[in-house]
């Protein structure tokens, strides 16, 4: 190695060594373990997909997970088929009957949400389930198809080590206040605008 | 149903019916099918997790996917274990040796990235792979561990129906310009700030 290159390598090592010390101290300072209330919101893609990725991670550790779909019906055949390989560890409840503009029947949507919430409440009491995904619950809350207070109370009363992921646009401020981890998925560029249709493996 | 309730139900139906017409027209207007170049960037969580969720979706359709990890080493044992159930359809290449502050050796990091890119180039020529995930490639590009021009050229020359997902903070502007779908994961609230440590099934 030439002398300037050796100096540059040494500088890099020193910089990274300092950064590692900071990083290690930060990791050491975090000692709490608890079930997290996670919210994926925003208008961008990836809210449900990242939740399914988390389910995958949890299942990979041999722990149990459950999914309740509040709004979507026939969509997401791809991950359903994939997750069928985990039916020893995963429970899946598709309660919604499609988007609200598909059913066009508010009373039926409210009834479907109430049924989905009843299932969710049972899951939120089970110690054996490490992760509960309440997919598109934010939509149900946004349209006032469910009482926010009961949802917040059930989340608060759940087993202390149970993780919950709630997805959907327009998350309520009260839910965000109670959450531990909130990520907003922001659309920067979308292929639909360029006339590209929904495709297998990407959208469904 | 009382008269006002019936009227409200009718109004809801009319509103949703109009919305469905708009929605259907939008869907019908999109006719192009193509392999998408997808970028997940931003400082928030969910970039890699959403990519793994997409892999799951693709595998669920019985199509082949491949993952190249540019930076991470021992992390993500959870999804690796889970995705092992798909080794008939999924190829996984962990090329990175950890974060740059772990190795503290720039030359070694550059060599690891070059090896990861060589594998990626092979994958980007294969017609049989429906989805290629280049995990944390943005980090390698950001530190100039790889030549941006070669990456952009290989992406452009790939099979026309192959989807690619690139993850990592600080995506280069030239990459975003070439991308079809870009989502930024924005952190709104993070449990690390409250002293909660990385936990099994969430971070790894």
Image (cartoon, coloured by chain):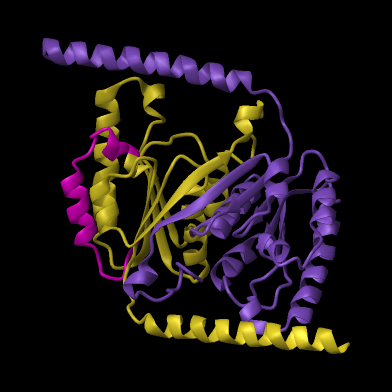
Chain colours: A purple, B yellow
Residue A126 visible in the displayed image: no
Toward which corner of the image does residue B70 lie, by quadrant?
Answer: top left
In the image, the segment drawn in magenta is B139-163
In front here: B132 or A45? A45
The relative height of residue A1 versus residue B162 in the rendered view (above or below) is above
Q: Give the percent coordinates (x, y) of residue A118.
A: 85, 64
Residue B50 image point, x, y percent: 50, 53
Q: Residue furthest left?
A: A2
Q: Residue at x 75, y 65 (%)?
A: A144
Q: Which quarter of the picture shows residue B168?
A: top left
Image quarter where the C terminus of chain B lies is top right
A8 over B58 or under it: above or below: above
Q: Is residue B170 left or right of residue A133?
A: left
**Which image quadrant: the N terminus of chain B?**
bottom right
Relative horizontal placement of residue A119, taking residue B181 as reference (left or right): right
Q: Residue at x 47, y 59 (%)?
A: B55
In the rendered image, the vertical position of residue B9 relative to residue A119, given as above or below: below
- Residue nearest the observer in this picture, B175 or B96: B175
Residue B81 shows up from this direction: yes
Horizontal and vertical percent position of residue B153: 17, 55
Q: Is residue B147 magenta?
A: yes
């Amino acid at each position: 190695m030439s002398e300037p290159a050796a100096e540059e390598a040494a500088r890099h090592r020193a910089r990274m060594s300092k950064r590692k010390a900071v990083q290690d101290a930060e990791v050491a300072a975090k000692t709490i373990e608890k079930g997290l209330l996670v919210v994926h919101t925003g208008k961008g893609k990836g809210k449900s997909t990242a939740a399914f990725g988390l389910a995958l991670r949890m299942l990979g550790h041999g722990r149990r997970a459950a999914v309740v779909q509040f709004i979507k019906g026939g969509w997401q055949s791809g991950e359903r088929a994939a997750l069928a390989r985990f039916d020893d560890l995963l429970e899946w409840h598709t309660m919604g009957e499609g988007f609200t503009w598909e059913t066009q029947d508010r009373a039926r949507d409210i009834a479907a949400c109430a049924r989905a919430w009843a299932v969710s409440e049972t899951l939120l009491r089970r110690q054996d389930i490490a992760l509960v995904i309440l997919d598109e619950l934010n939509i149900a809350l946004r349209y006032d198809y469910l009482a926010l207070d009961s949802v917040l109370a059930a989340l608060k009363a759940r087993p202390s080590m149970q993780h919950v992921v709630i997805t959907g646009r327009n998350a309520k401020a009260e839910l965000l206040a109670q959450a531990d981890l909130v990520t907003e998925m922001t659309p920067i560029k979308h292929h639909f605008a360029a006339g590209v249709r929904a495709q297998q493996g990407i959208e469904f």
